[in-house]
Image (tube, helix red, strand yellow):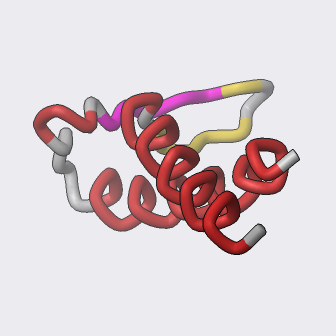
Amino acid sequence: MSFFKALLPGSILTWLVCIIMGSNGSRGAWLNIHHVSIQSVDFYWSWPLFIAATGLAWGIFWMME
């Protein structure tokens, strides 16, 4: 159950970091931040950062149980 709780904070952390770094033109090295356009909505996203942020949130929620 803690994994599903961790998806929201992981997504928010990824979105915020990608907005800050992507809007400045940075690729983020291993973060691989890229520009995504879905149905005319443009944003920056990074799957490696999403996995790391979700894992971090999952660990925190797991320790709180």
State the predominant SS element of the stretch in magenta. Answer: strand
In this rendered view, identify the residue nearer to me: 57 or 16. Answer: 57
Residue at coordinates 48% horizontally, 39% vertically from top-left?
A: 45
Residue placed furthest toward the right: 1
Q: Residue 12: image x %, image y %?
A: 63, 61
Q: Is residue 36 magenta?
A: yes
Residue at coordinates 11% horizontally, 37% vertically from top-left?
A: 29
Quadrant of the rendered image containing residue 60? bottom right
User: On the picture, is 14 further left or further right than 41?
Assistant: left
Q: Residue 22: image x %, image y %?
A: 32, 51
Q: What range of the chain is rendered magenta? A: 33-37
- Which quarter of the image is occupied by the N terminus? top right
Residue at coordinates 73% horizontally, 32% vertically from top-left?
A: 40
Residue placed furthest toward the left: 29
User: On the picture, is 3 further left or further right than 42?
Assistant: right
In this rendered view, identify the residue nearer to me: 49 or 34. Answer: 49
- Which quarter of the image is occupied by the C terminus? bottom right
Say if 20 sits above or below 45 in the image: below
Q: Is residue 32 magenta?
A: no
Residue at coordinates 62% horizontally, 52% vertically from top-left?
A: 58
